[in-house]
């Protein structure tokens, strides 16, 4: 049975369900940073997925990237499946700006995260749900 | 017309052509680190690609990940399209080990790269070409 890894739970907020799995908002408020977790048990790597499931995830990543572009007008979208810290397959989709804290470096391991204010977090989640119609 | 960005040229070695584009070996010998560059002009982000081209790239990423797994028996595969430094869309596919220099951090911006010895580099390229039949 698919269950979300406890570290992913503790470092994010639930947004909703996409076709391929769970959509989360990263708890680090410095970036518009979403995380897609394919709802398949015991997945570690992208290449372990069946092709049909990969394509479903790809379509979700594309929809999420386009929604981020519409909502935030970023300079770049970063897409990454790393999983060195949390073994459960999860895909980061992050809107980046040339003026953001880590630019041009990747967001991981750069400085301390900033916590969301509750209203800011709820607004970010509501905006994304509306953009994705989920 | 598609041409490889000069920074990608200078920081990698050509391996061959896959269905979706050019395969490169990163010049940093600390990790088995390959880079796929879809052969489409003026691409910046994954979500700018047509779906058929995305799926072609996805199939290449899967083949490359499986070849890395067979050749190196890594602990994890990292897949990422960042592009904050080099605007041309390129996808990193990297074999990671729990004993490698950066683990569990991402490989980017961690320490100085190590240059390949010529024989080591040629062997890495030859092994990957054989594994991918390219």
Image: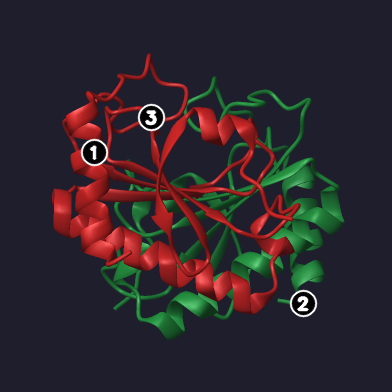
Chain colours: A green, B red
Q: Give the chain letter at badge 2.
A: A
Residue occupied by mark 3 = B27
Q: Visible in this render: residue A20?
A: no
Q: Is residue A37 above or below residue A17?
A: above
The nearer-to-camera label among 1 and 3 is 1
Viewed as shown, does residue B81 lie left or right of A52?
right
Q: Secondary structure at mark 2?
A: loop
Q: Is residue A31 above or below residue A131?
A: above
Circle 3 residues within 10 Å: few <14, some 14–19, many ≥20: many
Residue occupied by mark 1 = B122
Circle 1 residues within 10 Å: few <14, some 14–19, many ≥20: some
Q: Residue furthest top?
A: B112
Q: Give the chain letter at badge 1.
A: B
From the top left corner, tell me how far across and down residue A84 is, in percent. 32, 42
Q: Residue at x 62, y 40 (%)?
A: B83
Viewed as shown, does residue B37 lie left or right of B73?
right
Residue occupied by mark 2 = A133
Q: Give the chain letter at badge 3.
A: B
Q: Quick one: quadrant of the N terminus of chain B?
A: bottom right
Sequence-wise, which precedes: disc 1 or disc 3? 3
The nearer-to-camera label among 1 and 2 is 1
Foreground of the two, A36 or B67: B67
The quarter of the picture where residue A66 lies is bottom right
Q: Secondary structure at mark 3?
A: loop
Q: Secondary structure at mark 1?
A: helix
Q: Residue at x 40, y 54 (%)?
A: B16
Disc 1 to disc 2, C-alpha distance:
50 Å
Disc 3 and disc 2 on one polypeptide chain: no
Disc 3 to disc 2, C-alpha distance:
43 Å
Disc 1 to disc 3, C-alpha distance:
12 Å
Q: What is the total number of numbered labels drawn onto the structure image?
A: 3
Are the residues at dot 1 and dot 3 in contact (C-beta closer than 8 Å)? no
């Amino acid at each position: 049975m698919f269950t979300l890894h406890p570290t992913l739970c503790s470092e994010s907020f639930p947004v909703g369900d996409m076709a391929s799995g769970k959509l989360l908002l990263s708890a680090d408020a410095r970036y518009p940073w979403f995380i897609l977790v394919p709802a398949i048990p015991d997945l570690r790597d992208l290449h372990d997925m069946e092709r049909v499931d990969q394509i479903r995830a790809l379509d979700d990543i594309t929809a999420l990237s386009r929604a981020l572009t519409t909502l935030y007008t970023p300079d770049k979208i970063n897409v990454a499946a790393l999983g060195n810290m949390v073994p459960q397959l999860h895909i980061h989709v992050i809107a980046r700006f040339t003026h953001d804290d880590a630019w041009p470096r990747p967001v991981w391991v750069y400085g301390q995260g900033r916590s969301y204010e509750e209203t800011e977090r709820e607004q970010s989640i509501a905006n994304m749900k509306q953009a994705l119609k989920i």
